[in-house]
């Protein structure tokens, strides 16, 4: 049976990881996989998470199933952080826990496919590589619109808006709320407003992916443009991830909110999602949700989480500023936000940096800013500068 299957190309990220691990040189620089690293290159368990895990381990009396929608208390505690207090209290918003942001995106795609089988989804080029596969897995047609010019490091806003003028009513527009992966580039507030107006005017459904809240300018700041858009459009989907801002990657924690034009519609959409979720993973994993619920129920743990998140964000922004200072051609990196930058490098230059200098990044030129430290940054900048001018 399995002989009939096609060979699958090795995942680019896994290949890179293998190359990195088998490279015996000292001083290798890992700018590949998208996890936060501290000044020592470690991805630590956050203090608040560590403490909440102890509390959960002590207090938990059963491992019996929770529910198809996951931990409702976790969802209701996360809602004001993501949506803001007013929307969290608005019954046109309905949320559920999902296995990571990925689970939320897949569920959103399945919901769209069921609600409107003709819907197409517009994704800006480039986007997180998994966005395409996730949407296509649900049977959606993916249409790409221009978003970012790698050579000039600019957002192609006019090109994007003209492409979207050709969208059909009922089409979906995928947006990154903040800290765009892979470019780090973000729309201005005026551009968000224009996008919201376009969605409202043309009847497009925004699907807003918020996977790095708190790693750009702050928890509130990173959600502000998305929230303003939500106040303009009648319907929307919001997919959140706790992988990065709680450092819970492997625990697989996220959430999906449906904003309906009225409460009944949002409830009905969530019921559909629960049914779909039942047939994919039955119920989301509980550990991460118990931990985040425990943090958000405690003012002390919440303060500790926010303080550590602030430190992470400050480190990312400091590395951005330092890189921009060391490599003047990359001045835009200091204006961008989040964990990634898409450097204006050819594939050959990326290979050369790996082979010659032991610097690892994805072949399209995406680098993880969190892989930089004050120690390795000068060497990275020196190796990089000649490649940029090639
Ligand atoms: N959206 C974006 C833009 C991402 O970069 C990621 C993770 N790389 C996710 C969603 C999903 O993250 P997770 O499933 O690990 O929560």
Image (spheres, grey):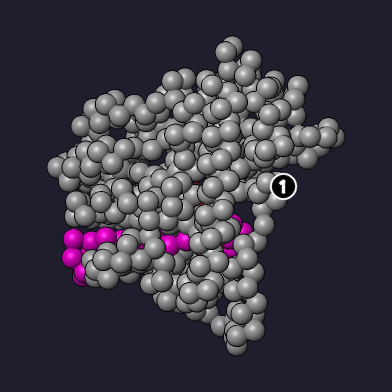
- Farthest left residue in view: 201
- In the image, taking residue 50 as reference, residue 284 lies left or right, namely left
- Residue at the spot 46% in from the left edge and 28% down from the top edge: 332
- Residue at the spot 21% in from the left edge and 69% down from the top edge: 263
Are there few (<14), some (14-19), or many (20+) residues within 10 Å of tag 1? few
On whether ligand 1 comes within 8 Å of the CB at mark 1, the answer is no
Residue bearing the label numbered 1? 40
**Could one spot residue 69 in this view of the protein?**
no
Q: Residue 120, position in %: x, y? A: 30, 41
Residue 53 position (above or below residue 121): below
- Residue at the spot 64% in from the left edge and 69% down from the top edge: 50
Residue 142 position (above or below residue 116): above
Q: Residue 71, position in %: x, y? A: 46, 75
- Please say whether residue 249 is one of the residues in the magenta stretch: yes
* Frontmost residue, 268 versus 173: 173
* Frontmost residue, 224 versus 18: 224
- Farthest right residue in view: 24
- Residue at the spot 37% in from the left edge and 35% down from the top edge: 124
- Please say whether residue 158 is one of the residues in the magenta stretch: no
In which quarter of the view is residue 247 placed?
bottom right
Q: What stretch of residues is rendered in magenta?
A: 248-265
Residue 293 position (above or below residue 331): below
């Amino acid at each position: 049976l399995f002989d009939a299957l096609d060979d699958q190309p090795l995942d680019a990220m896994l290949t890179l990881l293998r190359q990195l691990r088998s490279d015996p040189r000292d001083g290798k620089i890992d700018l590949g996989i998208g996890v936060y690293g501290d000044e020592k290159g470690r991805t630590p368990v956050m203090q608040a998470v560590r403490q909440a895990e102890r509390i959960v381990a002590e207090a938990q009396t059963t491992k019996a199933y929770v529910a198809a929608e996951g931990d409702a208390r976790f969802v209701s505690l996360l809602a004001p952080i993501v949506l803001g207090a007013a929307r969290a209290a608005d019954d046109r918003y309905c949320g559920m826990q999902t296995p990571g942001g990925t689970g939320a995106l897949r569920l959103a795609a399945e919901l769209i496919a069921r609600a409107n089988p003709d819907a197409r989804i517009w994704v800006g080029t480039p986007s997180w590589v998994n966005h395409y596969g996730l949407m296509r897995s649900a049977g959606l047609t993916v249409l790409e619109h221009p978003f970012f010019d790698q050579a000039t490091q600019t957002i192609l806003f006019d090109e994007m808006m003209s492409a979207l003028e050709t969208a059909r009513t009922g089409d979906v527009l995928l947006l990154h709320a903040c800290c765009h992966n892979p470019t780090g580039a973000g729309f201005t507030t005026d551009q968000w407003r224009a996008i919201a107006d376009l969605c409202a005017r043309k009847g497009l459904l925004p699907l807003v992916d918020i996977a790095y809240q708190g790693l750009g300018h702050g928890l509130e700041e990173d959600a502000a443009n998305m929230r303003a858009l939500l106040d303009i459009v009648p319907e929307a989907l919001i997919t959140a991830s706790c992988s990065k801002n709680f450092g819970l990657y492997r625990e697989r924690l996220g959430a999906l909110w449906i904003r309906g034009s009225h409460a009944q519609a949002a409830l009905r959409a969530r019921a559909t999602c629960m049914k779909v979720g039942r047939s994919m993973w039955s119920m989301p994993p509980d550990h991460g949700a118990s931990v985040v619920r425990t943090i958000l129920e405690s003012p002390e743990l919440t303060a500790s989480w926010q303080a550590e998140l602030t430190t992470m964000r400050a480190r990312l922004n400091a590395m951005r500023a330092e890189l921009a200072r060391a490599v003047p051609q990359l001045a835009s990196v200091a204006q961008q936000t989040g964990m990634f930058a898409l450097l204006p490098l050819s594939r050959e230059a990326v290979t050369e940096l790996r082979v010659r200098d032991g610097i690892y990044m994805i072949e399209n030129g995406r680098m993880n800013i969190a892989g930089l430290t004050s120690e390795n940054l000068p060497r990275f900048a020196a190796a990089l500068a000649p490649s940029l001018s090639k």
